[in-house]
Amino acid sequence: HANTNQGMGDGTHATPTLVCTGGEWYRFPSSYYLPPDTSLAFLKSSFDGQLPQPFTEFGSKEESLALQGRFNDLNEEEMDRYVDVSECSFVIELVGEDISTRTRNENENDVSEVVKYMKDDENDWRLIAQYDFLDVEKTSSLHRILYLPVIRKASYKQYSLFQRGEKKEEAL
């Protein structure tokens, strides 16, 4: 957090800085840990249920219902919870590999929806932080339970933080 929050909200902006996430919405650490004037926002992903509502100034008191409207108790998707990637200043996403080493010929189906949104966006997105995250699907239970440094056979994905840059230059 301390190394990656530079350029995020510092309390001086009229509109909040948006930190967006797609399929990782349930695993992303609570928005309580975001700097001031920074809000968590959601990008459309394969998840089609109800996403969390942002907290109001009233927290979970009854006054919040007046601001947020009806409560969706059927877990139905609400399209107004999503933003377009162009509205985001930062994007957090779990990617299948170190994308800085990805080649252009690799299968597009292996790329997350959020990475595709950034690729199609008119802005350049740059990777500013990336950390190993254990890939449970590709790591056996034995190697997830026991840490055996001599025979460590774990597979990792990359938890990545991207920052929106300048608009892409059009090709001539």
Image (spheres, rainbow, N blue to C red):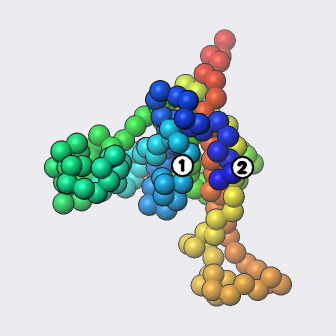
Crowding around mark 1 (Cα neighbors within 10 Å: few <14, some 14 to 19, many 20+) is some
Crowding around mark 2 (Cα neighbors within 10 Å: few <14, some 14 to 19, many 20+) is few
Residue farthest toward the right in the current orientation of the protein: 150
- 4 relative position to 114: left or right: right
Real-space CA distance between mark 2 and mark 1, rounded to the nearest whole angstrom: 13 Å
Of 109 and 47, the residue lying toward us: 47
Tag on residue 65? none
The residue identified by callout 1 is 34
Residue drawn 46% across the image and 43% down it: 39
Q: Is residue 53 visible?
A: no
Tag on residue 3? 2
Residue 118 on image: x %, y %: 55, 37
Residue 48 on image: x %, y %: 32, 54
Residue drawn 49% across the image and 62% down it: 27
Q: Is residue 64 visible?
A: yes
Residue drawn 67% across the image and 83% down it: 143
**Residue 125 occupies quadrant:** top right
Residue 11 on image: x %, y %: 54, 35
Pick whichever of labels 2 and 1 is earlier in the sequence. 2
Look at the numbered disc 1 and give the secondary structure of its residue. loop
- The residue under label 1 is which amino acid type? Leu
Residue 139 on image: x %, y %: 63, 76
- 27 relative position to 8: left or right: left
Look at the numbered disc 2 and give the secondary structure of its residue. loop
Residue drawn 55% across the image and 25% down it: 122
- 131 relative position to 75: left or right: right
